[in-house]
Image (cartoon, rainbow, N blue to C red):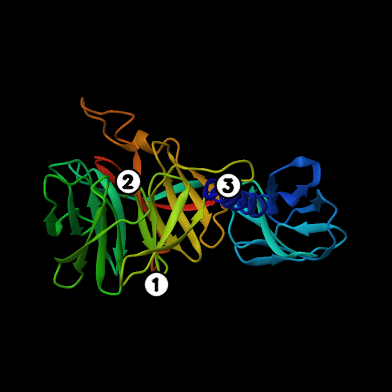
Amino acid sequence: MVKVFVSLFISLIFMACGDRGSKSDLFQIDLEGGKNIFQHNQSIGISINNKNEKSISKVVYSIDGTVLPVNGNKINMNVPFLGNRTLSAAITYEDGTIEISKDIRVLAENAPEVYTYEIVNTYPHDTGAYTQGLEFHNDTLYEGTGKKGRSFLRKFDYKTGKVINQIDLDKSFFGEGITIMKDKIYQLTWRGKTGFVYDLNKFEKIDSFQYGESTEGWGLCNDGEKIFKSDGTEKIWFLNPDTLVEEGHIEIVTNKSVFNKANELEYVDGKIYANVYQRPSVMIIDASSGAIEGVINFGGLDKHVTKGENWNPTDNVLNGIAYHPTRKTFFVTGKDWDKLFEVTIAKK
């Protein structure tokens, strides 16, 4: 008798679990043409596949908490963040409310515009500086470099190349990007999962921090309120400057695909300028949405660089971009290049 009761009890449990599990199978989000890749601001037909013909009283569609109104059985992909997203549908029906979802990808609305450059001035650059980060504070240039055993943080006179001060990293670290914000300098390391914080005025290390979900340390920049961090993936992370905790991210996209090569970063007027890893180009990324709005072609710049016998075309690549707000020009260089270039950019 006990065995019968136990068997019946177990059967009831599995029946209950089956009911709960099948509840989400009652409905499915159907998108026009069976597609799951769309452009920003694109209108797309949408419906709910009501498999068991339940009575539905209300459906609310949303992406990342942004409600998408339905107009003529269509929704508009007017969302704040692009890339890989989750489309949700909160369905109120005869038995209650349920939320279902569908993975989609939202790409940029327009193709990137192409920009070119003009060299304004040429300055000396240390061939022992494997440039990973470059940023101005007032008229002084700050640089973070890589390679184990020769990674450092430096400030120098860009006109002469004279070093004002330098902090060497421990030989176990491969230095990466830097940014300056509120009298502090932040510096990444590549795969050490560790970043460093320095006092800008005293030019000394005051703290360190660990990475969160981001996989590696590549580039840094800031908009005066938050820090942006690239990690070699399609994501650019938002860091809280006080806690250095990752508080979200954008994904980098063109109108055709998700992109994952952002390296050194520079923030200017709502845009992130990002070196493309191992390419003579810089992306112009909308810092809010992640859309790549432009690409600067720096092809041919390395022809002005003296290439020694140890020159490696896959290693000694363009990297390092800093904006001078007073001069309204960009300064660019490369890993172990002997020159620093001041340039202007314009649409091609």
Residue 261 x, y percent position in the rendering: 44, 42
The quarter of the picture where residue 241 lies is: bottom left
289 lies above or below 308? below
Q: Kindly identify which numbered label has been placed on residue 4.
A: 3
* Residue at numbered disc 2: 333
Cβ atoms under marks 3 and 2 closer than 8 Å: no
* Residue at numbered disc 1: 224
Dot 1 or dot 3: first in sequence order is: 3
SS for callout 3:
helix
Dot 3 or dot 2: first in sequence order is: 3
Work out whether residue 46 can be spotted.
no
Which residue occupies the foreground of this view, 331 or 9?
A: 9
Nearer the observer, disc 1 or disc 3? 3
Residue at the spot 42% in from the left edge and 37% down from the top edge: 279
Nearer the observer, disc 2 or disc 1? 1
Q: CA distance from mark 3 to mark 2?
A: 79 Å
Dot 2 or dot 1: first in sequence order is: 1
Which residue occupies the foreground of this view, 269 or 23?
A: 23
Residue 233 x, y percent position in the rendering: 43, 45
Looking at the rendered structure, the kind of residue marked 1 is Gly
